[in-house]
Image (cartoon, rainbow, N blue to C red):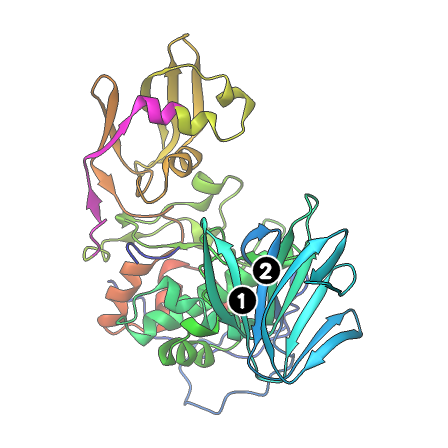
Amino acid sequence: MRPEARGRQRGAGTVLAASALGVGLAALVLAGCSCERPQPRKAPPVSPRPVPTIRVKLGSDAPAVTLAVDGPYRLMRGEETVASGDRLEWARLELRGGEIVAGATSFGPPPLELHPAQDGTVAVRFPANGKEVERTYRGFVRLVATADGKLQTINVLPMEAYLAGVLPNELFGRWHVETYKAQAVAARTYALAERNRRLSRAFDVYDSQQSQVYGGEGSETSKSREAVEATCGVVATCRDADGRVRLLLTQYHSTCGGATCPSGAVFGGSTPAPLAGVRCPYCLRSSKFRWTGVVLTKKEIGEALRSRGVPALARLKDVVRVEVAETTSGGRATRIRVTDSGGASLLVDANFWRSALGSLRVPSTWFTVRDEGDRIVLEDGHGFGHGVGLCQFGAEYLASHGMTGEQIVRFYYPGAVLVRAY
């Protein structure tokens, strides 16, 4: 999660040893783990496996997408090259009659891929958040047809190049490189875990807060590239209930507000030990460490819930009462009770409720509710984000007070085993 608008030390760090980690499998078998003593700096080990690729869905599905390459390129359908040249000026590709066309030229049915020359980039104009954006990307771009006749634009690129375009969109540029290293491990592990869950789908991750905020080649910085290179291939793992070693779904957020939250309380299911939550008073510098006075009218709450496409909520009448019905042991709301003018009382997942009202407007689910007639006021608020896993503002505090990126990862995911996946 991108930070707004944009510690206790737990022992010496460790050096990561290579391990046999199959990142393309749902169940991971490890042949090694991190050692427990600091070691002298050595040259990076030769990777036992190639860097995996990641498929990133760019923006919103649309009837057309506009592409350009400032250099040699190939337009391909499978193994067939359907067009090539020394430079591609802006070309508008659209889906028409089941084929991808540019003006009067048809390139056949999708999927279609635009490959720049080695080390080149693809420029893309596409819709995102209701407006057209223009960005450049490493790797290549794949166009896929959706069931409703639109084009889905997917950037396929090496994982490490992807991460270099994620970190600057998740952290402030002035923050410490060790914070960037911790974020790199968390973002890499999260992306690989999502990749493993979506092997049968056309893409692995979104380029937005639905997954991780990714801005492409144009958003990379020297600091993001340094952090990615320094942690190349390093991921966090844990053992599941059956004793098998798996990738940890390393969620993270901007500001925990004093303590991180067990993952099961937010996302459902069981809570792996490294995601059970830790006390974190280190995000005090965030303006969202404490917040209050968020005003929501009951009319807008009703409209927001009815618009979510859930049958039970679509039948909701005028909202007359909103209250926190259930909380975690730490005080975060897990369920919100909404009562309407017909007497119907519905329990709504607190994170769903927050999302419906706007995750920027309602910073977190840790608050109390004061009823003021036709509106409610959220008071005594803590934090920004879902509160699970690494707290970015807390990580920056720890980095600025001497912790390494690895130590920060171990603090926020206690018990996780760090290994080199490739």
Give the numbered dot on residue 65.
2
Q: Please tell me how many numbered marks the rendered image carries.
A: 2
Q: Quadrant of the C terminus?
A: bottom right
Relative to residue 44, is residue 339 drawn left or right? Answer: left
Residue position marked by numbered label 1 in the rendering: 124
Three-letter amino acid code at disc 2?
Answer: Val
Q: Residue at x 30, y 58 (%)?
A: 6
Query: What is the quadrant of the N terminus in the image?
Result: bottom left
Residue 128 percent across, percent down from the top left: 48, 53
Which residue corresponds to the image point at 32% horizontal and 55% vertical from the top-left?
254
Instruction: Check residue 225 for magenta coloring.
Output: no
Q: Are marks 2 and 1 in contact (CB under 8 Å)?
A: yes
Q: Residue at x 37, y 35 (%)?
A: 357
Q: Mark 2 or mark 1, which has the lower sequence index?
A: 2
Asked if residue 159 shows in the view, the reply is yes
Q: Is residue 422 visible?
A: no
Tell me which segment is drawn in magenta.
Answer: 286-302
Q: Is residue 75 left or right of residue 415?
A: right
Mark 1, Cα crowd under 10 Å, few <14 / some 14-19 / many 20+, is many
Image: 421 above or below 410? below
Residue 308, position in %: x, y? 49, 31
Q: Closest to the observer: 35 or 195?
A: 195
Regarding mark 1 in the picture, which secondary structure is present there? strand
Q: Residues within 10 Å of mark 2 (few under 14, many from 20)?
A: many
Query: Residue 329 in the image: x percent, y percent?
Result: 33, 36
